[in-house]
Structure formats: C-alpha cells, structure tokens
Amino acid sequence: CFRQACQAVALHKMAASPAPLHEMAASPAPMHDVAASLAPQHKMAANPEPKWQPQLIFRSQVKSPLTFRSQVKSPLTFRSQVKSPLTFRSQIKSPLTFRSQVKSPLTFQSQVRSPLIFRSQVKSPLIFQSQVRSPLIFQSQVRSPLIFQSLVTSQLNSQSLVTSQLNFQSLVTSQLIIQSLVSSCLPCGNFLPA
C-alpha cells in the first residue's frame, strides 16, 4: 500500500512538472502568463484547483435504489387504499333491504281498483241511452222541406242577380266600344267640306 501511494505521488508530480525546454522555446508564453506562473506557493495552496470526479458526481445525481423504493408505494399502503371486500359489500344493498323497497303483492293489488269500483265508473246502459237524443228531437233539428225549398229559391234568385250583373257589364263594354268609335270618327270630320 505504501508503494502504491508513492507511485501516485510521483505521477502527480510528473503531471505538475513544467514542459521541456524545446517545447517552451517553440511556443514562448506571454509575460502575464510567466508572472502568473511565478506566483507564491502559499496562494496556490490556499486556492487549489478542484479535481473533477465524474463518477462520484454522476452517482450523487442518480437517486439511490433505497430512495427510489421509498417513493414507490408499498404493497401494504396500496392495499389500504383499495376498499376491502367487506366495505364494498356493505355499500351494496342487502337482498333484504332490496325486497322491502319493492312493493309487496298485497300492496300492489290494493292499488289496482277492484272490479266493483271499475264497473261503477262505467256508465250504465240506461244513462247512456238517455244521453243519446231521441228520434223526435233529431227530426226537429232537421229543417222542414218548406224551409229547404225557400233556401233553394233564394239561391236561384242570387243566380239571377249574378246574370244581371254580367248583362250590365256587357252593356258597359258596348258603351265603351261606341265611345271609341265616335272618338275615332271625330278626326275624320275635319277633312269633310264645309
């Protein structure tokens, strides 16, 4: 173990050692870089460069398997959220309660009217016959033949009035034709000799 530690320190010193002279001559550093390189050792020791540890940082970002398992609900907690079969059965109405909600056959028969009450609601044949009008009343409602004939004669008179109106219209048209003929002959009279 001591030998491995010594090898690690030697490798670290070799990595921190300056470049060879031929590399420094090939690319000389500017003055401000040289001045920065000649800084005191106590300042460099006070602010050491942070070492990049990729494996440790990556593992710290990933959640540990213990933390991941704690986030997932345990099977016991999941079962407690689901209603137990006893609770589910208590929510469903028992068959005894369901039967009490359905009306019993005795109650259903009492709601239906008995045949005696139903027959009393239907009108008896005597009452029904009294509502129908007697043939005498029906005949009195029909107008007598004399009244019917008078109505027919009035219709004939109305037709004669219509024919008279048509004749009057024909007379008016004939008068208009005569007036148009007279007006057409008036200009011809101007050429007649005096």
Image (cartoon, grey):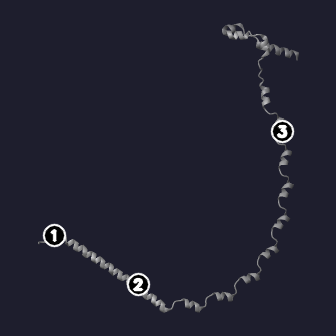
Q: Secondary structure at mark 1?
A: helix
Toward the viewer: 151 or 59? 151
Question: At 30% across and 79% down in the image, what residue appears?
Answer: 171
Q: Amino acid at mark 3?
A: Ser
Q: Which residue is mark 3?
A: 70
Question: At 58% across and 92% down in the image, what residue appears?
Answer: 136
Q: Give the Cα distance between marks 3 and 1.
A: 131 Å
| Mark found first going from the N terminus, 3 or 2 | 3
Q: Residue furthest left?
A: 194
Q: Amino acid at mark 2?
A: Ser
Badge number at residue 190: 1
Q: Which quarter of the rendering shows the C terminus?
A: bottom left
Q: Which residue is mark 2?
A: 158
Q: Quadrant of residue 115?
A: bottom right
Q: Residues within 10 Å of mark 3 (few under 14, many from 20)?
A: few
Q: Give the Cα distance between marks 1 and 2.
A: 50 Å
Q: Secondary structure at mark 2?
A: helix
Q: Is residue 174 above or below residue 17?
A: below
| Mark found first going from the N terminus, 3 or 1 | 3
Q: Name the mark nearer the viewer: 3 or 2.
A: 2
| Mark found first going from the N terminus, 1 or 2 | 2
Q: Residues within 10 Å of mark 2 (few under 14, many from 20)?
A: few
Q: Name the mark nearer the viewer: 1 or 2.
A: 1
Q: Quadrant of residue 125?
A: bottom right
Q: Give the Cα distance between marks 3 and 2.
A: 110 Å
180 left or right of 32 in image: left
Q: Residue furthest front?
A: 194
Q: Are marks 3 and 1 in contact (CB under 8 Å)?
A: no
Q: Is residue 194 above or below residue 53?
A: below
Question: At 31% across and 79% down in the image, what residue appears?
Answer: 170
38 left or right of 69 in image: left
